[in-house]
Structures are given as C-alpha cells and as structure tokens.
Amino acid sequence: MELAYRATDRTDFRKLNMQKLPAPLLSGLSIAFDLDGTLVETAPDLVRVTSEVIATRGHGSVDYKLARAEVGYGSRKMLRTALNAVGDQVNEADMDDLQALFLKLYADSLDHLSHPFPGVEETLITLNALGAELSVCTNKPGCLARPLIEKLNLSRHFVRIIGGDDVPRKKPDADHIFAAVGHRNSCRIIMVGDSWPDMRSAQNAKAFPILMTYGYTPLPQIRLRAGSRLSRFRDIVPTLQARISAGRI
C-alpha cells in the first residue's frame, strides 16, 4: 500500500478538491510517545546535571554509560545510582535536597545538549499528515517536559503532553496512556517508548507497543515484550503501514 500522501510533497493542497482525496491512512489512530530516549536524546543534559549535583558532595563525574541507562527511571534513581557507585550512602532527607538541586539546575539548562533523535521531525510531520493524532506520555514532570519540547520546536505536532505529575498514576499504569491519548479505545492506540515503563504501560492498556532500541534501559531489550522493535524512528511509518495492510490495526 502506498502512502496516501507524503509530508515532503510540494503539492499545493489548496488547489485540490479535498472531497476526492482518500481518507488519511492513519485516521483514527492515536500514537503516544515517550520523551526521554524515544523522541529526544536528553541523556547528555541529565547526566551533566547529575555530575554537577554529586560534585557538591566531593565526587567526580558519573559514568556516562551507567547513568544513561537510568534516565527513564527519574532523577532520584539517577542520583542514587551515581552515589551508590562511589560508596556514598545518602539518607532520604539529604536525597530530597539533592533532588531539589537537580531539578533546579536541570530546569535552567534542559536544552543545552539535548536534541531530537534522527528522523523524529520528519516522521512526526508524516504521521500527522497521514491522520494520526500524536501525544507525549512521559514520566518526566510536565513542568519540564513541556518547556523542553517547546524549546526543541516539537510542540506543534502534539495534541497533548502529559507528564508524570499530571496524572494520579504514571507509567506503567495504563491510565497515563489513556490520559495522553484522550480515550480508552485500546485497539486504536500505539505506545512508542524505549524502556520497561513504556512497554509495561502499553501491555496494561492493551495497546500496541513499539520499542525504540536506541533508547535508555538497564534491562535486556528482549525482556521488554515489545510488539515491534525498531532501531530508527523513521521506521515507525512503514511499520504501521504494514500492520494496516495486514489488517492488524
């Protein structure tokens, strides 16, 4: 099946009789995207800030590879892992202070090194043009997620950006996905992510899970039970196209 039309075409659609066009290929489909490790390479800034915070306790920079794998589990987990690696046992009160410092430093510089992964911008344009409704479903606090997406000029692609603090229960709870897409029709929902909370929340919601293998996870990817595993963001379109052709969506 050929795509109904491509976002890169230079056709002047104002000159077409829109009533003669076929229904967009992905009309009625809701796609929820994780943010960190799926849409945006945020690890450089998050690891940088982690190093800045633990430096206040006299430690050097964190191991980048180790810290990158922890990104999907939040700032507190990143800090705890970094401190455990150097044998620094921090009590909960001190950890509260360190996390507050982390969030302040990160909010002030969240887009210094972060950037969309290859293929994100053009794929989002194409998915929108094909009729899909796109949203962001991230455990990152919404007060950080929305400014970051705005700074990277991606906000216009999404109808909703729902952070972990915008819902009573965040991923892996299914309700986080339902809040992001705005309905509970599981057979029309795709969850695209890179880690266990994303895949588990999709399973809980009975949505179709797509795992981006370039992302952040400390777990072996084979254990994440994805419906599809993709190494390139741009492969989302042909993957969905193939499932529609096979009558599986």
Image (spheres, rainbow, N blue to C red):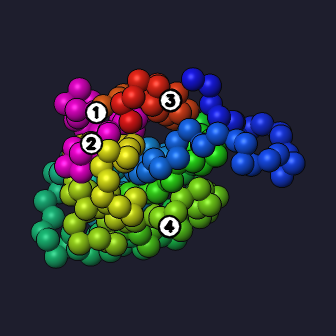
* Distance of label 2 from label 3 (alpha carbons): 21 Å
Residue assigned mark 4: 146
Q: Earlier in the sequence, mark 4 or mark 2?
A: 4
Local packing at callout 1 (Cα closer than 10 Å; few below 14, some 14-19, many 20+) is many
Tally of numbered discs: 4
User: Could you tell me the amino acid type at mark 3?
Assistant: Gln
Closest to the camera, between mark 2 and mark 3, is 3
Are the residues flagged by discs 4 and 2 in contact, CB closer than 8 Å?
Answer: no
Q: Earlier in the sequence, mark 4 or mark 1?
A: 4
* Distance of label 1 from label 3 (alpha carbons): 18 Å
Local packing at callout 3 (Cα closer than 10 Å; few below 14, some 14-19, many 20+) is some
Taking 180 as reference, is 113 above or below it? above
- Residue at x-position 62% and y-position 31%: 3
Give 126 or 74, whichever is nearer the viewer.
126
- Residue at x-position 22% and y-position 66%: 169
Q: Secondary structure at mark 1?
A: loop
* Distance of label 4 from label 2 (alpha carbons): 22 Å
User: Could you tell me the amino acid type at mark 1?
Assistant: Ala
> Which residues fall within the magenta stretch?
203-226
On residue 241, the disc is 3
The image shows residue 56 at horizontal and vertical percentages of 34, 66
Residue assigned mark 2: 199
- Check residue 238 for magenta coloring: no
Farthest front residue in view: 20
Closest to the camera, between mark 4 and mark 2, is 2
* Distance of label 2 from label 1 (alpha carbons): 6 Å
Local packing at callout 4 (Cα closer than 10 Å; few below 14, some 14-19, many 20+) is some
User: Could you tell me the amino acid type at mark 2?
Assistant: Met
Q: Earlier in the sequence, mark 2 or mark 3?
A: 2
Q: Earlier in the sequence, mark 2 or mark 1?
A: 2
Are the residues flagged by discs 4 and 3 in contact, CB closer than 8 Å?
Answer: no
